[in-house]
Image: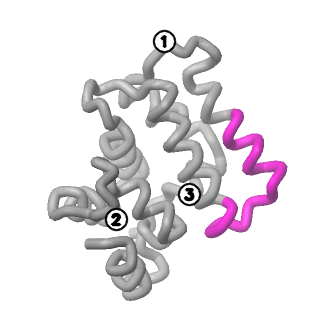
Amino acid sequence: MTSKQYETYYQTLDPNNAIRKLHHELGFLLFDTDRNDEIDFVEFLMANAFATSKTRHEALSYVFDMCDYTQDGRMDMNELVRFSSVAVASAKSTLHTSTLKTMGLAADIIRFIGLKAEKKLTKEEFIADCEKNLILSKLFEVKS
């Protein structure tokens, strides 16, 4: 699925769908885990698994898996910065978060690791930190 095909698909989704909380361009960026400018079948399945999550914890677990590009079970600073750009832009566009609050969100996300560039987050640390943040909690809120 190309970016244009994804945009068409995105527009057909129910407004309460978790994917609709992500700006369509940012959702594509998040789901295109191999960076080939297409969402393949496995990536599409991951996006749908994320969209049908029953709990915030489960949704964040899928987000971690999609952001863990090195697939080492830990999120490094580069992976966290990528997540931050998607989360901040999505919060601004879908939750209408102010610029000041989105800047604070970006800083909060970087604090998950701190200034130690060699540190990596486990999936559970990532989920726990996201769940403590009000904006991220709302962004990844699961509606039944």
Q: Is residue 104 magenta?
A: yes
Outermost residue, right direction? 100
Mark closer to the chain start, 1 or 3 = 1
Q: Which residue is mark 2?
A: 51
The residue segment tinted magenta is: 92-107
Element under label 1? loop
- The disc at residue 118 is 1
Residue sitting at x 27%, y 63%: 39
Q: Which residue is mark 3?
A: 139
121, above or below 104, in the image: above
Q: Quadrant of the N terminus?
A: bottom left
Return the x and y of residue 78 as percentages of the image width and height: 49, 31
Q: Amino acid at mark 2?
A: Ala
Most foreground residue, 39 or 56: 39
Return the x and y of residue 45 as percentages of the image width and height: 20, 62
Q: Amino acid at mark 1?
A: Glu
63, above or below 124, in the image: below
Q: Quadrant of residue 84?
A: top right
Q: Quadrant of residue 114?
A: top right
Element under label 2? helix
